[in-house]
Amino acid sequence: NDITLTMIKPGAVKKNHIGPILGIINENGFRIKAMKLTHLSVDLARKFYAIHEGKPFFDDLISFMSSGPIVAAILEKENAVTDFRALIGATDPDKAEEGTIRKLFAESLSHNAVHGSDSNDNAQIEASFFFNQTEIF
Ligand code: ATP
C-alpha cells in the first residue's frame, strides 16, 4: 500500500489537538505505520523544508516548526498521498473545505495544523527523515 508522511505541527500539539486529529485520520481509513512525538531543531526544520529556502515565508516557517514538539507519523492507505491531502484540505484554512483537518484545527496559513507529503517520492524521503526501518510497522 501507499504511504504518506504527516506532521501535527506545534500549534496543534500545544492546543491538545493530537487526539482528535489522530481520530479523524483513523476514521478515514489510514493505518499508522510509525509515529513519534519529537521536536525539530532549527537545523532539522531547515533541512525538512529546504525546498522553500529563499521564499518570503521561509524564516517564519522555520521558527514556527521548531517552536515546540510535533507528532510525525507514517500513514498507510491506498492512494495515501492524494487522499490525505484531500482530508487535510487547502494550505490556507480559509480555503479549506468544511470537515477537513485544517478547516477544523488550523489557526492561519502559516499555523495550519498539519503537514502532508505532496508526492509518493517525497513521502518516502520524508518517512526516512523521521524514522529508521526498526521504527516502521
Ligand atoms: P505542507 O507542506 O505543510 O503540507 P502544503 O504542501 O500545503 O503544506 P507548501 O506550499 O508546501 O504547502 O508550504 C509549506 C508550509 O509553509 C505550509 O503548510 C504553510 O504552513 C507554509 N506556507 C506556505 N505558503 C505560505 C505563505 N504564503 N505564507 C505563510 N506560510 C506559508
Image (cartoon, grey):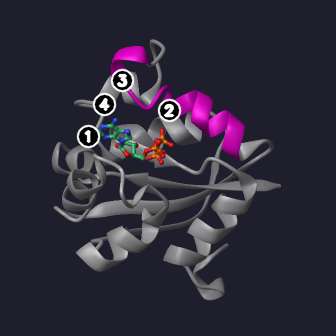
Q: Which residue is mark 1?
A: 111
Q: Which residue is mark 2?
A: 88
Q: Gap in Å between the C-alphas at discs 1 and 3? A: 9 Å
Look at the numbered discs 1 and 2 and tell me whether their residues touch, using CB distance below 8 Å. no
Dot 4 or dot 2, earlier in sequence: 2
Q: Gap in Å between the C-alphas at discs 4 and 1? A: 9 Å
Quarter in which the C terminus is drawn: bottom right
Q: Is residue 132 visible?
A: yes
Q: Gap in Å between the C-alphas at discs 2 and 3? A: 9 Å
Dot 2 or dot 3, earlier in sequence: 2
- Give residue 128's quadrant in the image: bottom right
Magenta span covers which residues? 81-95
Q: Gap in Å between the C-alphas at discs 3 and 4? A: 9 Å
Say left or right for 37 vs 72.
left
Q: Gap in Å between the C-alphas at discs 4 and 2? A: 10 Å
Look at the numbered discs 4 and 2 and tell me whether their residues touch, using CB distance below 8 Å. no
- Give residue 17's quadrant in the image: top left
Query: Which amino acid does the dot numbered 2 rest on?
Result: Ile
Say left or right for 82 vs 12.
right
